[in-house]
Amino acid sequence: MVVGRAYWLRDVPKSENMSISQQVRAHWEAAGHRIVASGRAGNPDLSGESRPDGFTLTLTWAEGDNLYLGAASPCVWPDGRPSE
């Protein structure tokens, strides 16, 4: 099972999308997370992996020039541990 969350960044002017992306990247790197992909020039998309737990982190540029932050867990076992 995977658990995920997404949060829309409302009221961010589209002219600030790249600045927001740079700030998010700097924050993730300062926290020790690994950047695994980023958007092409002018595209604020980011993908990362949290350390040490391996959560997937995303900053996604969506239709309408809106941004959202997302996170998804690595596998979660229903009873808290893998079956044997």
Image (tube, rainbow, N blue to C red):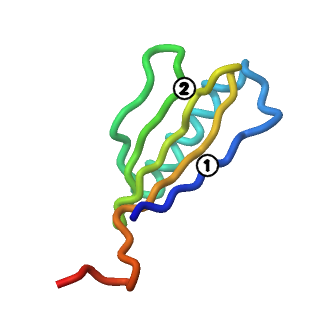
Mark 2 lies on a secondary structure that is: loop
Q: Given the current orientation, which residue lies at the most extreme right position?
A: 11
Q: Tell me the residue that label 1 is attached to.
A: 6
- Frontmost of labels 1 and 2 is 1
> What residue type is disc 1 on?
Ala
Distance of mark 1 from mark 2, alpha carbons?
A: 16 Å
Residue 76, how many percent across, how many down? 38, 71
Q: Which of 84 and 62 is in front in this view?
A: 84
At horizontal 60% and vertical 24% (from top left) the residue drawn is: 18
Give the x, y percent position of residue 83.
Answer: 23, 82
Q: In this view, does 54 lie to the left or right of 10?
A: left
Do the numbered discs 1 and 2 sit on residues whose CB atoms are within 8 Å? no
Quarter assignment of residue 64: top right
Q: Tell which circle, 1 or 2, labels the residue nearer the N-terminal end.
A: 1
Residue beneath label 2, please?
44
Q: Where is residue 36 in the image (x, y as percent from the top left)?
A: 33, 39
Compared to residue 80, the image places residue 25 above or below, namely above
Identify the element where label 1 is drawn. Answer: strand
6, above or below 25, in the image: below
Q: Residue drawn 83% across and 34% down?
A: 11
Residue 59, by quadrant, is top right
In the rendered view, would you say 62 is above or below 58?
Answer: above
Q: Classify mark 2: residues with Cα within 10 Å, few (<14), some (14-19) or many (20+).
A: many
Q: In this view, does 36 lie to the left or right of 57?
A: left
Nearest the viewer among 44 and 75 is: 75
Quadrant of the rendering where the C terminus is positioned? bottom left
